[in-house]
Amino acid sequence: MSEQVEHTVGAGPGLHVADRDRRQAMAQALAGAVRRGELSLHYQPQVDLRNGTMYGVEALLRWHSPEFGAVWPAEFIPVAEQHELIVEIGDWVLRRACEQAAAWRRAGVGHLRVSVNVSAHQLAQGDLARRVQEALLDAGTPPQLLGIEVTETMLVLDAARAARELHALRAIGVQISLDDFGTGYSNLSLLRALPIDVIKIDRSYVDDVTAAPNQVSITRAVIRMAHSLQMKVLAEGVETEGQLALLVSGGCDAMQGHCFSPALEAEAIAELWHARPVFDAPCLQRGGPRQRTVLLVDDEESILASLRRLLRRDGYRILTATSAAEGLLQLAGNEVDVIVSDQRMPHMTGVEFLRRAKQLYPDTVRIVLSGYTELESITAAINEGAIYKFLTKPWEDQLLRANIDEAFRQKAMADENRRLSRQLHDANEELAGLNERLTEALATEHERTQLVETGLGGAVDMLIKLPGALLGVDEFGCVSFVNREAEALWPARPPLLGQDASSALPPALAPLLAEPEDCGRTFENDGVSYHCRIRVLRDGPSCGRLLLITPLASLQEPGS
């Protein structure tokens, strides 16, 4: 979508032409464009800002008409929607994107996820998930290599239907992105309820280093809000390293734009992936030992030269700038620990510059070094935290070095606190996840235990009601189980359960209780003949003997 929006402002051929006849003619030409092979897809790379790797692309539709020439999407997409051609075109885009993802996968071009924009008309059909699944199966593309992009406006038009379709798509396994965030009617409660994986910040929110602090704050607020909802953030339309540096410092997860690459044909994407799979922008350099860096800002070259000579012996990496604007550019391209700025500079004072630096790069330690004291503005800046210290010119060398060294120590302690805080946060999240998994496991085990208990209860009930006298004798020789038939055999005797079997049972059974193997025997008791079969239990939690006793009369068939 970013390339489409990019061309809505400009002099694309016929972009602002409202002539009805032209639109009608364009609709007629577009109706056969799929069949005649006039449509094509270009792909704009998407870069992970954590490590600079190219992980996906957005599929962007192109139409080259024999009659109208190359037509911008901003012109022909509305025509396709108005004349109900967009569903057919959308299906073609979906299938072509799936085929291309599978082709790249077979060619060894990483695991590039291809994101496809869908229209409100496609969503309104009610079978988008089925169409997506068919396209994936026909192309042989794993679901994780496809992304579906929807807009805020589409979700607002029919929230219930949109929710059903998006949940169905999530069940398939495709990634879902909310495109052009901030340009529609944002409904945070709706956003929280939908299965959105990625929020794409519109290019109008992608600010440069010269942007006002409040504009930068909006972008960072969107990023924090998305992260709190467990969503990733992708910024589109990123064109400069200054914009990129602000996004990186604000915690943005990914980006696409001319800063890395414009939209390319499929073959060019493969070549780019092999030639430059990792974006090597300075602001993305992370990890490994990093030299302590100080930025010196002063409009007098002689002052900068003196400060460089003074601080060189301390082993710092020293950056310089002769204006606030140049200082912002240095901050955009480098990771700076301490800033030392003059107060009186053209266009922007040192305090104003450091206020901006605090908004954009809050982890820096900021010092004013000036021969002019504007007490009110300096005091306000110190009170609001924009300035760590105010030092005066001319300076005393050892005192200045000591103050800058202390600033680096403050920065190191703050960095360590942030690192520990991140570790604690990660550990808490891991523990929370582990606790959730344990809770689920305990719930599952409880259900299993209940099922086992229910089964055991049923089994015991059946044994109690068994039409035969059944007794259990444990490994210590005690009667551990007696069913109803067994209790009824010898009602004159005391209750058998818990008694020593050798003394509680008829004496004729005593030899059987000592047998090491399964056996059976007939015996008499009080003038009645019985048959007893004994099963020796050795395996499992139960050890002992199981006795089945049946009066011989009950074994004879009636009339025999």
Image (spheres, grey):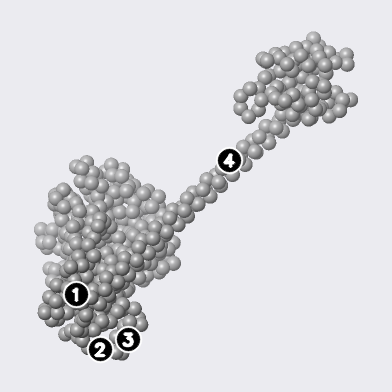
Q: Which residue is mark 3?
A: 379
Q: Where does label 4 land, which residue?
A: 448
Q: Please name the residue shown 31% across and 44% down the image.
A: 142
Residue 296 disc label: 1
Q: Height in image: 117 above or below 468?
A: below
Q: How many marks?
A: 4
Measured from the top left, where is residue 533 in percent x and y?
Answer: 72, 16
- Image position, residue 283 (x, y; %): 22, 63
Q: Earlier in the sequence, mark 3 or mark 2?
A: 2
Q: Mark 3 or mark 4, which is nearer the start of the sequence?
A: 3
**Which badge, 3 or 1, comes first in the chain's sequence?**
1
Report crowding for label 1: few under 14, some 14 to 19, many 20 or more residues within 10 A (C-alpha).
Answer: many
Gap between marks 1 and 2, in whole Å?
A: 19 Å
Question: To which quarter of the image does residue 488 belong?
Answer: top right
**Image marks 3 and 1: residues in contact by CB distance under 8 Å:** no
Left or right of 400? Residue 309 is left
Residue 9 on image: x %, y %: 18, 72
Q: Earlier in the sequence, mark 4 or mark 1?
A: 1
Which image quadrant is residue 82 in? bottom left
Please tell me which residue is depicted at 20% across the width and 67% down the height of the picture. 314
Residue type at mark 3 is: Thr
